[in-house]
Image (cartoon, helix red, strand yellow):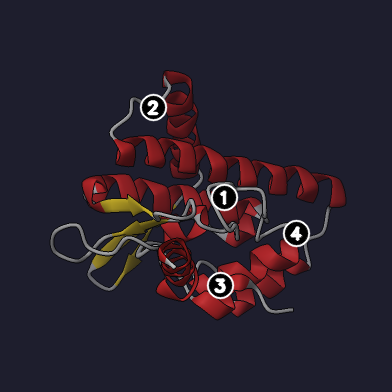
Amino acid sequence: MTYYWATHGFFGGHIALDFINTVDDDGKSRHQNAIPDWSAVFEWCQSSGLLTAGGITLLKSKNDPGKDEDELVKLLQLRELSWCVIRDVVQGSDAEQSKLDEFTKAIQWSMTNARLIQQQKSLNLEAEISELGKTVVRARIGLALNDLISNIDLGRIRECGRCTGLFFNQGRGVGRRWCRMATCGNRAKSQTFRRKS
């Protein structure tokens, strides 16, 4: 199976945004989930670098159907919560306090499930597979979200003009308008051309 990110790549500019963008919609909806099962989640985790191939093999050996299904639901809830909060900030709207509180709890949970690892002359917070099982994916995403809101100028994040994709705008001025020119950019240009014809 070919997943959409294998065709279009990762366009968010930050792993937390790439996770938020794991929907494959044509328009301003988020109905087509691109990580509907653990196989897709693992494929995304390896492609994004969130987990190594060895880590994924280890997680695949830890099966608990009931808990796995619940954890997938929690992971997707985190994605949609993150999208709502970050999108409100991007649009200059006031995020609902209840959503901000949930977002805070999600990040705090990730922080309490991580530990400092020394890598040469640096210290990094990491969530360990051996301790967390499949919840490690949500924990690592939470750490990535913390990095996003702590170290990235959220004023430079844009929402695609055609879909719900969010991306870090690294250009000067307004910069790009579309998540990917190959998809939304070309579709928008085609629509504009048809209206003018």
Residue 67 to residue 163: above or below:
above
Nearer the observer: mark 1 or 3; the answer is: 3
Q: Quadrant of the N terminus?
A: bottom right
- How far apart marks 4 and 1 lie (CA) works out to 14 Å
Residue 57 to residue 14: above or below:
below
Give the residue pinned by disc 4.
37
- How far apart marks 1 and 3 lie (CA) works out to 19 Å
Q: Residues within 10 Å of mark 1 (few under 14, many from 20)?
A: many
Q: Residues within 10 Å of mark 2 (few under 14, many from 20)?
A: some
Give the amino acid type for the residue marked by disc 4 in the picture.
Asp
Give the residue pinned by disc 1.
138
Residue 5 - label: 3
Front residue of this view, candidates 98 and 84: 84
Give the amino acid type for the residue marked by disc 3 in the picture.
Trp
The quadrant in which residue 111 appears is: top left
Give the amino acid type for the residue marked by disc 2 in the picture.
Ala
Please, which residue is most extreme toward the front here?
Answer: 197
Drawn side of residue 58 relative to residue 29, left or right:
right
Nearer the observer: mark 4 or 2; the answer is: 2
Image x and y of residue 11, in percent: 41, 68
Residue 112 seen anywhere in this rendered image of the structure: no
